[in-house]
Image: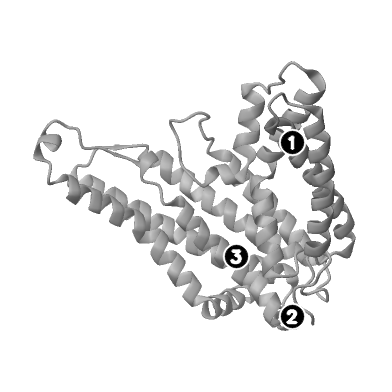
Amino acid sequence: MVVGELIRKEIRQYWVQLLLSILAISFMIPIRVWTQYLEYRNFEEALESNMFTINFEYSDPTFIFIVFVVTLGIVQIGVERNNGTLEFNLAMPFSRASIYISKWMVGFGSILISWFISFGLTGLIIKLAGIPTVNFENYFWFLIGSLLLFYTMTFSAGAITGSPFAQGLVTITVGILPLLFIGLIGVQLEVLTEPDFLFSNEQFLSAYNLTPITYVFFKYDSFPIKEVYPPFIEAVFFFILGLFAFIKHPFERNGSFFVWKWMERPIQVFVILLGILGFSSFGYLSTFDHSMVGYFVGAAAGAFIGFIVSYFVIYKKKNEI
């Protein structure tokens, strides 16, 4: 089968990165749980009074796992394109869709296998040792959703960018954009409406749950409570977007920020707009009396900085072919 051959090739090519990711995700949580249990064994009184409980809200290595899966996504597309091996793969008798899907399946497969191992070992340790836990199942659902979201988001970013740097920067930007944007809009509305404008809890919660960066840390009992399903829905969206881009875009612009040249000007305008909103908000909020002078000075500085940053980041090629 074509996909099977591509999967085997992908595993042989990136077995080191895959192995490191699998080892980290599979064993870090079970080791931490067992270590915490051994430490608490020294406090017999606490054990006898049922004070020993592992709350997964406060023992959360999700950020470390996300670093591994984001790195894997960048290596699979950004670094491979930068090295020219992606062009070689496209010259082989495989469709672009099959190449994209097989690459993603290898990455997601490593995440899923690691998750099952971690969940099984942790559950076994908890069962055999009789360790009381809080948020055990919730945390592991959160974990698989977070890893799938960040991996797929990074992977799809590689399908529309021409360098590893651009892929990583787009991933970070998309990861914080919804919550950042609604915060900046809130400040702008406060400037226009006076007295202070506030989004409702429902509006804030929606933006919070749609923002990928909020799934870096598991805080189940803290406001706002995280939803389980948004990461899976967003991962499907990013997968489809990346697949479409990977099939349709040209590959001769390796090293450029975007593989589609027409994206450069709209994104530059958006970066300038974001700079204006961000620096005007900072200028307005940083003044003692929320002065409009600070607002307009910040807006001018944001427009200038946004233009300079977007020009040198988007239009300067990172790797000349």
Of tags 3 and 1, which is closer to the observer?
1
Task: Identify the residue under disc 3.
Answer: 73
Crowd class of label 2 (few under 14; some 14 to 19; many from 20; radius 10 Å): some
Figure check: 36 above or below 200: below
Tell which circle, 3 or 1, labels the residue nearer the N-terminal end.
3
Q: CA distance from mark 2 to mark 1?
A: 47 Å
- The percent coordinates of residue 230 (x first, y second) are 60, 40
Few, some or many C-alpha atoms within 10 Å of disc 3 (few <14, some 14-19, many ≥20)? many
Q: Is residue 108 visible?
A: no
- Under mark 2, the amino acid is Glu
Q: Nearer the viewer, residue 21 or 38?
A: 38
Q: Quadrant of residue 171 in the image?
A: bottom right
> If you read the primary sequence from the N terminus, does the residue marked by circle 2 or circle 1 appear first?
2
Q: Amino acid at mark 1?
A: Gly
Q: Is residue 199 above or below residue 308?
A: above
Which residue shows up at 66% across the image and 76% down it?
80
Q: Quadrant of the C terminus?
A: bottom right
Disc nearer the start of the sequence (2/3): 3
Mark 1 residue element: helix
Say if residue 71 shows up in the picture. Answer: yes
Tell me the quadrant of the picture where the N terminus can be found.
bottom right
Disc 2 target residue: 87
Residues at marks 3 and 1 touching, judged by CB atoms closer than 8 Å:
no
Give the Cα separation between the discs numbered 3 and 1: 37 Å
What mark, if any, has residue 144 been given in the picture? none
* Type of amino acid at the residue the image marks with label 3: Gly
Which residue in the structure is indicated by mark 1? 283
Q: Is residue 188 left or right of residue 138?
A: right
